[in-house]
Image: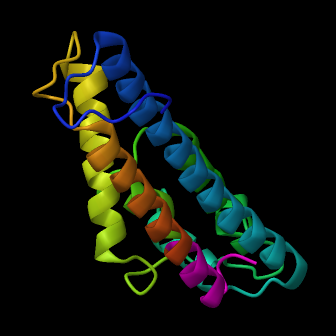
């Protein structure tokens, strides 16, 4: 932000609006980033499936969480129906997850879970600190966008001591998360 911190919190309405915009835009960028990570994990797993026809934890997660219906094995292994073709079942699960990613609207725990749990991301890769930071930022962004008609000092934390610090902490948590995804082989 391009103004000096005020220890007394006496920010102008314009400065408070800039802080609010900073939070809303930061939220949007983080949401976009998480969606891109989810899509990348999915696309890379689908490419591995198409090349080797070997399931990995991403494909297993997709088949576990993104199935519209259960199906039985084909009567003729050489001539399965479309609904009984393993390749078509994988394609449908990938398509459904792609729609979930496209329809995502948030960064809270439930959003992250819908984006990543079906892609094989587990509790081993997601730290509690990341979830707390994402949920806190999601709540503050929601308060600004959905609940307030104007900026109020008592509803807005100090943009220097609170908001910037929280966003920087969140970015550090995201870096740690990325490293865990790489170690787990989910991001190449």
Q: Is residue 71 visible?
A: no
Is 184 part of what is drawn in magenta?
yes
The number of discs equals 0
Q: Position of 142 compared to 60: left or right?
A: left
Identify the residue at horizontal 51%, vertical 74% (top origin): 177
Identify the residue at horizontal 47%, vertical 74% (top origin): 64
- Residue 81 position (above or below residue 25): below
Q: Position of 135 compared to 55: left or right?
A: left
Is 36 part of what is drawn in magenta?
no
In percent of width and height, residue 168 lies at 44, 57
In percent of width and height, residue 67 lies at 50, 62
Q: Nearer the viewer, residue 112 or 145?
A: 145
Q: Nearer the viewer, residue 56 or 36?
A: 36
Boundaries of the magenta span: 177-188
- Residue 109 position (above or below residue 101): below
Q: Position of 68 compared to 131: left or right?
A: right
In percent of width and height, residue 78 lies at 83, 80
Q: Position of 32 compared to 147: left or right?
A: right
Q: Give the quadrant of residue 7.
A: top left
In percent of width and height, residue 173 lies at 44, 69
How was the colour assigned to the protein in this rendering?
A: rainbow
Q: Give the quadrant of residue 170.
A: bottom left
Q: Quadrant of the C terminus?
A: bottom right
Identify the residue at horizontal 86%, vertical 85% (top origin): 52
Q: Nearer the viewer, residue 7 or 15?
A: 7
Q: Seen from this angle, which residue lies furthest left? A: 154
Identify the residue at horizontal 32%, vertical 64% (top origin): 131
Q: Give the quadrant of residue 37.
A: bottom right
- Residue 1 position (above or below residue 43): above
Q: Is residue 129 visible?
A: yes
């Amino acid at each position: 932000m391009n103004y000096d911190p005020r220890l007394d919190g006496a920010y102008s309405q314009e400065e408070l609006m800039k802080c609010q915009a900073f939070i809303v835009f930061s939220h949007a960028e983080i949401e976009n980033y998480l969606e891109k990570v989810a899509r990348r994990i999915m696309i890379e797993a689908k490419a591995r499936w198409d090349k080797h026809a070997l399931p990995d934890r991403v494909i297993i997660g997709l088949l576990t969480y993104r199935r519209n219906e259960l199906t039985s094995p084909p009567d003729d292994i050489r001539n399965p129906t479309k609904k009984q073709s393993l390749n078509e079942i994988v394609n449908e699960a990938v398509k459904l997850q792609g729609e979930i990613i496209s329809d995502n609207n948030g960064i809270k725990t439930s959003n992250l879970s819908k984006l990543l749990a079906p892609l094989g991301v587990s509790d081993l890769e997601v730290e509690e600190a990341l979830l707390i930071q994402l949920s806190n930022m999601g709540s503050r962004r929601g308060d600004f966008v959905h609940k307030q008609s104007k900026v109020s000092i008592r509803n807005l934390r100090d943009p220097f001591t609170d908001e910037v610090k929280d966003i920087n902490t969140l970015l550090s948590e995201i870096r740690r998360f990325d490293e865990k995804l790489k170690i787990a082989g989910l991001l190449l």
